[in-house]
Image (spheres, rainbow, N blue to C red):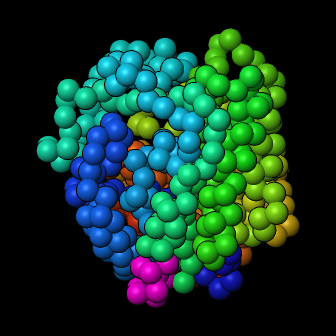
Amino acid sequence: MKRSIDRILTTHAGSLIRPPAILSVLKAEAYGEPYDEQAFASELKGAVRGVVQQQKDTGIDVASDGEFGKVGWNNYLMERLEGLSLPQRMLASGFRFPGQDRASFSDFYAQYDRIQYRQWLPEEIAEVSRPRSVRWFCTAPLKYKGQAAIQRDIANLKAAMAETGVEEGFLPVVAPGSLEATHPNEYYPNDEAYLYAIADAMREEYQAIVDAGLLLQVDDAFMPTLYDWMLPEKSLPEYLKFTELRVEALNYALRGIPEDRIRYHICWGSWNGPHVSDVPLKDIVHLLLKVNAGAYSVEAANPRHEHEWMVWQNTKLPEGKVLIPGVVTHSTNVVEHPELVAWRIANFARLAGKENIIAGTDCGFSQHWNLIRTHESIQWAKLRALAEGAALASKQLW
């Protein structure tokens, strides 16, 4: 894993806004409809080449494939795990996320949900008759079957990097706990058995990415988000105990993989909502650092969590580890000023050491095929601001 030796390096959280041709296929895949796999493979390869070039041109040092081959950051496993199925009741009714935030601001969310999963989608893709989201269930033993898909993603990213001159790339994957959260268990005898079955199955994908020479990014948005889901029934100690088991299952899946090839990403869902019941970073940072990863990617730019850079005044980043703070956010269409980005970077650099900081984003810009957080032009403007801010910070820090 590259480090900020003589300047602040830049990256992002993984997902980028997919082109319309890819969206139409991912929509079909999400709802179990047929599509032309050969044509999609050709379209996907060219799209990944283009998005890697655009990342380089924008000033991003550590690039991804934009997650272009996936229907979503955690539900892409429907094509890679045997044992998951989509009940007809889900196609008929859809799925709505729970949470204390939603209960406290129900009037807001009633309107927000009507537009959030439709805005910025091409008109030919956004079908109002479709449910907003569906849930796949575990109904049989889990077994990894995604060898062809992960090798396709690896090959596309590596080819794009070779053609564009990008030196380091990463592929995001889902953590066991975040897969468990939205894919209910109807087969295994208990939560622990299900978690470790996920860990065993996903380990093959994790290992394949690292064996290919790419960085592995483990996405675990539900690690902090589940606190909100558990309120008010569960206490903070109960949530922490619950979460510790999920961290242990992740470390089990990562066993033997060098830490300096692993990035671990968390966020609070990052949608443009109130977030008043989010768990504070100070209450979970010890669990974050228990993950056997070389770098920790943490949401740090939105108004609810921006102040939490101060957590690192009292929490020491372990020796040899890297912090990837989000210094631009996808939760607003306001483009951050590069000087603000530089200020945010400098705050983290003073506390954790400039060589231990890589500038990133709060989360991805399109976590699911039908969920686009900003307009595409704003996505790239924000990434340019990220790169420009990192350059300003580098001048100050070196």
Q: Is residue 233 visible?
A: yes
Residue in the image at 37% along x and 22% along y: 88
Furthest toward the left, the residue is 124
Q: Quadrant of the N terminus?
A: bottom right
Tell me the magenta residue range: 158-166
Q: In this figure, what is the number of numbered marks?
A: 0
Residue 108's place in the image compared with 73, above or below, is above
Q: Residue at x 31, y 58 (%)?
A: 37
Q: Residue at x 76, y 56 (%)?
A: 254
What is the magenta segment's predominant secondary structure?
helix
Indicate whether residue 136 is drawn in magenta: no
Residue 322 rendering spot, x and y as whole percentages = 72, 66
Judged left or right of residue 256, residue 44 is left
Direction from residue 385 to residue 187 in the image, left or right: right
Q: Position of residue 255 (x, y in %)?
A: 81, 57
Whether residue 307 is visible to the viewer of this picture, yes or no, is no
Q: Residue at x 48, y 32 (%)?
A: 85
Percent from the top left, x then y, of residue 99? 54, 21
Q: Quadrant of the C terminus?
A: bottom right
